[in-house]
Image: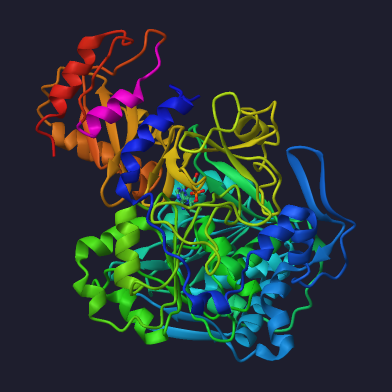
Amino acid sequence: MSRESMTSESITRESITRDGPDVARTFAPTEHFQAQANADASHYEHADRDSEHFWATQAENLVWTQPWDEVLDWSNPPNARWFHGGKLNVAYNCVDRHVESGHGEQVALHWVGEPGDTRDITYAQLKDEVSRAANALSSLGLVAGDRVVIQLPMIPEAVVSMLACARLGLVHSVVFGGFSPAALRARVDDAEARVVITSDGQYRRGAGAPMKANVDEALVGAETVEKVIVVRRVGEPVAMQEGRDLWWDEFVASQSPEHEPESFDSEHPLFILYTSGTTGKPKGILHTSGGYLTQVAYTHRVVFDLKPDTDVYWCGADIGWITGHSYIVYGPLANRATQVMYEGTPNTPHEGRHFEIIEKYGVTIYYIAPTLIRTFMKWGEHIPQGYNLESVRLLGSVGEPINPEAWMWYHTHIGRGTTPIVDTWWQTETGAIMITPLPGVTATKPGSAQVALPGISVQIVDDHGAQVEAGEGGYLVIDKPWPAMSRGIWGEPERAQEVYWDRFKAQGYYFAGDGAKYDEHGDIWLLGRVDDVMNISGHRISTVEVESALVSHPAVAESAVVGASDPTTGQSIVAFVILRDRNDGDIVDRDAIIASLSAHVVAEIGPIARPKRILVVPELPKTRSGKIMRRLLRDVAEGRDIGDVATLADTSAMRTIATSMAGTP
Ligand code: WT7
């Protein structure tokens, strides 16, 4: 239901302003890095020769209890089956096999709590914890295929819960802690979850905030939920519902640490993760086992150059997003990484917190989002300069395009001007990294994600699906199936075809929703979404979702939401609303109404969707066919001249809106 479509020409035009003078600058890998890198050019050659053979070689790094019959079954696109007939246990691959190979004493997680408490958890301890949790869940009668919703802060129990589900073939659906009770409930209902795992509360910026109370609110009348398991984290008093609620530290902790893992088919569902699309209803993106684990493990090994015996890896994402699933839980643990897991915000209790942790644990690989890099820039380089960051040897970026200036800052002030930076493009739907330089192989280029991973094939195409020339922009498509690809949308088998595959149906391409361009060397530059999806601090939020929340407020008649570019968060949410009455632009209690609308969006979706600005307007710009012209609203929100408005049904609307924008903060 995209209201206005972007053409490949308009993408080319728009991209010109973004490159700046940095296009030609490249950083060749150092000889030292190259000599020890996990990847080399032969990966590309192997994959180009025979991509299925290439992926089968990667899959062989996992332990399968039954070999697959066929590497890829693509007989019924877009439904792929990878390693069909093969059987494995994902949790066994992430935990037990490392203990069995003699690495039980290796630290899996250096966990750091926000208030300063820490826990080091070895692979042997992780195995016991996961086994206990698996025994607990099966004692509740859960069987393979049942769904478990997890809403937890960044604490070890989040990892343990996910792995316990994987071990039993239960399908987890992790819900980010910043989602509202209403958003949680929608996910619980959609997945028909039998169990919810949560905590009493969570630390946020130095204070405990309730979590269980939100879950209780979400679950009123939720018929599918039989049990709620509650981890004690902040010591918040909570109401425990007799017969439904169980304390983790009693119920799970008292279980046996012995648990025999069962094998599941390669295509057995592993998890659902909801993400925003172009409609108001989030989509439950489904991922399965063998192909997913193969690609997350391979990418984690080569893109982050992981050396399990010496590296200390840290991905700063939250477990509630795909980055946390693929690059905190499944990829790193499959590769026997030692990693840092941090519970809190980057400026609690001070702005040097991340660097203090890097110094303390000797972090060697550090993977964060550009929005955080830009925040560090704002705080000032004197902050990282106060710490010893010499252990860092590789940096990663994810979630949104990284502007060359932020890339250079990261390179200079965190990477000492020497470490490679991998700018990794991928999505919840792709499951794993798809476009990235390979450290030690690719000469990196600030601002560009550059090239498809070995075994992955992408193109930038025009409106008709034809590949564009070097120097031109268009739509990013993936033109061949890949192991970690989503296996569809939970409960809506027809929808994936429509959302991702119909746009270039004739060609059989997956449409990612991103605009991109090739530079003159054929390297790929990502240019942001071309649909109605915003990217706020690397989090995906749909304009329609926020609009639906706004119009569900009794005072709102109509609304239009746009993502306006923001120097720190990439984009910020700007909402234009028409009120039901008193829409004369002269509302006495305007501030109170705006505050109430803002609170309403937070209640409906969560704090991550809080608009940065809400503007009460008398009218919205619409085409003669009634479509809201968001591009114009974005121009206004970003302070640009609105230019030619000839296609508008009522040109005076824009003048009024532009005037009402003037003088707002
Ligand atoms: C969207 C996917 C990938 C995990 C985090 C976000 C944008 C992601 C990059 C990058 C430019 C990027 C795209 C994509 N995106 N990484 N390196 N350069 N854009 O996952 O929530 O599914 O969002 O994030 O627009 O479509 P997600």
Residue 339 at x, y = what percent? 51, 78
Specify how the rendered protein is coloured: rainbow
Q: Residue at x 72, y 70 (%)?
A: 139
Magenta extent = 626-639
Task: Pick the quarter of the image with the C terminus.
Answer: top left
Residue 543 at x, y = what percent? 40, 34
Q: Nearer the viewer, residue 527 or 579?
A: 527
Q: Residue at x 65, y 57 (%)?
A: 454
Q: Nearer the viewer, residue 462 or 214?
A: 462
Q: Residue at x 55, y 47 (%)?
A: 274
Residue 77 at x, y = what percent? 76, 37
Q: Is residue 402 magenta?
A: no
Among the 4 quarters of the image, the one containing residue 87: bottom right
Among the 4 quarters of the image, the one containing residue 391: bottom left
Residue 183 left/right relative to 603: right
Q: Nearer the viewer, residue 136 or 300?
A: 300
